[in-house]
Every structure is written in structure tokens, then in C-alpha cells.
Amino acid sequence: MGTDMVLSPITLSKFRAGPRSLRGLRLIRTQLQDRPLSQEDLTDLGYLRLDLIGLLSVSQNGTPGTLYLAHLLPLNVTGQLCEVLKPTPLQECPVVFDQFIKNLETDLQGALKHHAVTSGSESAILVSASSLGRAEQEERLAELADLAASVGVTVIDKIAQRIGDGHQRYLLGSGKLKEVLIQTLHKGADMIIFDQTLTPAQARAIAEMTDIKIIDRTQLILDIFARRAHSREGKVQVELAQLRYLLPRLSGQGTQLSRLGGGIGTRGPGETKLETDRRKIRDRITHLEREIEQFSKHQGQRRARRERQGLPVLSFVGYTNAGKSTLLNILTESHVSAENRLFETLDTTSRRLRFPQDREVIVTDTVGFIRDLPKELVGAFRTTLEELREADLLLHVVDASAPDIDVQMKAVLDILEELALDKIPQVLIFNKCDQLPPAQAEALCRRYDAIGICALNASTLQPLIDHLATRIHTMTSTQEPDIPLQPAPDPALASPI
């Protein structure tokens, strides 16, 4: 099964190192003193996923002495990573290595099959490393778990580590990173997802330490956007954001690109390949930016038509999964996708809502926000978010049941300020109030001067409808009497723009 040899970064790359199997190498070294395996030896066993690690003492006359052995254990309730066998003289070693390792591989595979991971899906360990307190990190990890779940990733474990504000080469310390990697291998996870965005240097440094898939929060969000985008405009914006993220992280490492650096055989074609890839990405970015400029011109033409019609525009804004699309559907009798998952809506949707006496408004729904929204996405989706600039009134929808409601509201307001949209009048709407005790929901609305609703229950919308009727009446005419706003009874009256 295995091969006895001295390990090095060069030779290790030739052997398998999947999280669901042993590497196919065993390490046995000698020592002059008769000492047992150290903690460092056991760490190497888990980190390198070795078949076995052994330590053989040598007597003063040069004859073999005591043999110390250790091997990994299948995932177990105690969380024990490895087992150290009883020391024996070399001549009396009871282990038949090939059969022992074959049985161990079978046990490891069997334990992983019983892990609660949906067939065909990937699994991950989530890691947060920042200067934030424990409670804040746990909130962020919970949100990261929701992001992972929205793309079908099963979360096996969450790890929070408090670090200083200074730059860390691996984000975590090298020792802590090794512990995380060992846990990932031991629990059979397919990847590690960092809550923080890794710098290009950190991503390269971690990639040099392991062949486990490592992604960060930004990559995860970009992947979600890539899955959710359906329109041509949405797909172009997502691809642009992905390429802008990738370009500074492109390096001459890995199987597709030759490694750059000093030494014979490391220059020439490798450097040409890397520069070729960079040039292709830059050219593609330029092409996509031109496409987005065309989208922006078309949006300008649509906005000009609306201005000529003199229709007020109401735009939903808010944290992702706050219920904006659900509210749009019930107000306009539309059927926009509104599943209970993060970033369900990426493409801008506009509906015309008709009032009695032919008074109309346009209601617009667009992409939801999230804390630390990747700057690549903000830049790429700027044309989509420009739709908000034409709004006469922003309807800020908030999930009243969220445990970190203040953080979510601040994230939205910060992005609006960044886009210079914070001067547009707003109406604060607390959705999902049915998930709170009535007294608590009422107190929350009073505290923030918000209107409480449940978008799934039309009977709770009357206070919101009355308020919007007053605001819209003020926008359109101070002469006409207030006319209550009602959802359009005829689907033809709630038509796409």
C-alpha cells in the first residue's frame, strides 16, 4: 500500500492526498536516543495524512532497538485523531504493514460514508479569523453557513479564531492553520471556507501548504451570483466581477501554469504562459466593460421613457433574503422567484402598479445587499444599482427576526451612502414580524419608526399601503384627494416594464 521514504515538498506532490484517503506514504525514521514519538510527529501524521509514522531507536552498537508506531483513526465520537501503538522491539513488531494499511483505509472510508453529507454535495469547515469578539464571529459564521447552504454545501464544523489586526501570512498562524487542515482531513471535508477575504499573498501561501480546496467569502458570494444570474446583463456583470477578483490572484503555480522563479528550467515558457493568461483576462474585462456600457445606455433610454410618462418610482432595497421579492409579488400580483435563500434576486425587476383613477407607479426590485459586499460586485453591478438613482422613494425592507438587525441595516445604509443614494427619501419596513411576539414587534417598530408587516400575509399590509398612498399622493399632486392604494386585481394591470 505505502512506500517508505523521506518526505519533501517535491516528492509529496506525486502522491494522492485526498481528504477521503491516506496519502500512500509511510514515514519511518531512526534516532540514537530511545524516545517515543513527539507531538510534532503526530501533527505531521495528521497534516500529511500518512499511512503510518514510525520511530526506530538505534543502540550504541548500531543494532535496531525499539519501534514506536502511530496511525490515524477513523472519525469517532471522542474526536481522537490518531492512536499510538505499544512500543515493541523491531524483531517482535506484530504489524503486517500492507494488510494493516489496507484495513485502515477501509475503516476510514467506512466512517466517512456515515457522515451526514448529502450524496453528490460538497462539505466544508468554516473559519473566521479576525479581531472581532466571539459573539460577532459566531454571527458572521452563521451567515457564512447560510451562504454555503444556498449553494448546497454541507457545513461540518465552524472554527472561530481571534487574531490581531496586523497582517498574517496565512491569516491564521501557521500552527493554527495546520490544526484546521488536520481537522478538515480527519472529518472528511472537501474544502475550507474563510469568512474573511484572503489577500492574493495569503491565498498563495495557504495553497503552498495544502492541496485542500480553499475559498474565501468573496469567492463564495461570486459563485452564488454566478448560479443565480439568468439575464445576459446579470451574467456579464458576474463574469466581470469574477475576472476582477481573479486577475491579482493569478500566479504561475499549479498544474496549469509553470512556476516562476529562479533556477534552471523555471523561466521562458512558464512566464509566457502566465503573461498570456493575464492578457486574455484583461482583454476579456475590457470587452465586458463595453457590454455593460451598452446596458447602461439601454437603461438610460428606459428611464427617459419613464420620465416622459411622469410615473413615480418606488425601489425596494434591503439586506439579502429580507423579503423584497415576496412583497413585490403580493403588491403587484407578480410571480418573481422569491425562494427563502440568500441572493435569490440578482436581475432588476420592474412592475407597473395602477391605482384607481389611472394613477400609476413603477415598483422596482433589485439585488439584495450583505455586509462586506465584495467591492468587485459593487463595481460590476453599478449599472444595475443605478436603477435606484431614479427612485423617488426607497422602500428599505428589513428582516425583523434577524438577530443582528442593526448590523444588517447599517450594511444597507453604508452601501447606499457609497453609491450616493442616501439622500433619496426612505420608508423603513420591518418584514417577518409574525416571527416575533406581537408586543416585541410593536416595540421594535416604534423604536425605529418603521412599518411592521408580514409579506406572506396580505392582511398585514394595510398600514403600509395607507402610508404609501399618502407619500405617492404628495409626489403626484397636492390637489387631488388621497386615494387608497390597492393591489391590482387584474394581472394585466401589474405589467413588466
Image: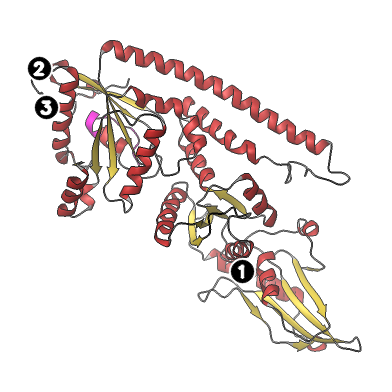
Image point 74% across, 45% down: which residue? 255
Image point 86% across, 88% down: which residue? 59
- Residue 422 percent across, percent down from the top left: 33, 32
Give the distance between the C-alpha atoms of the residues marked 3 and 2, in whole angstroms. 12 Å
Quadrant in which the C terminus is drawn = top left
In the current view of this chain or complex, which residue is farthest to the right?
61
Image point 55% across, 30% down: which residue? 240
Give the distance between the C-alpha atoms of the residues marked 2 and 1, in whole angstroms. 76 Å
Q: Residues within 10 Å of mark 3 (few under 14, many from 20)?
A: some
- Label 1: which residue? 108
Q: Secondary structure at mark 3?
A: loop
223 horizontally vs 305: left or right: right
Given this view, does label 3 or label 2 mark the residue nearer the observer?
2
Q: Please check the rendered image and state whether residue 263 is part of the magenta-colored stretch, yes or no.
A: no
106 horizontally vs 55: left or right: left
User: Which mark, residue 484?
Assistant: 3
- Residue 297 percent across, percent down from the top left: 45, 15
Q: Please check the rendered image and state whether residue 334 is part of the magenta-colored stretch, yes or no.
A: yes
Contact (CB < 8 A) between labels 3 and 1?
no
- In this orientation, does residue 447 appear? yes
Hey, what amino acid is under mark 2? Glu
Quadrant in which the N terminus is drawn = bottom right
Give the distance between the C-alpha atoms of the residues marked 3 and 1, in whole angstroms. 67 Å
Which region shows up in magenta?
330-339
- Residue 2 percent across, percent down from the top left: 77, 68
Hey, what amino acid is under mark 3? Pro
Q: In which quadrant of the rendered view does residue 110 lie?
A: bottom right
Note whether 305 is above or below 385 in the view shown. Answer: above
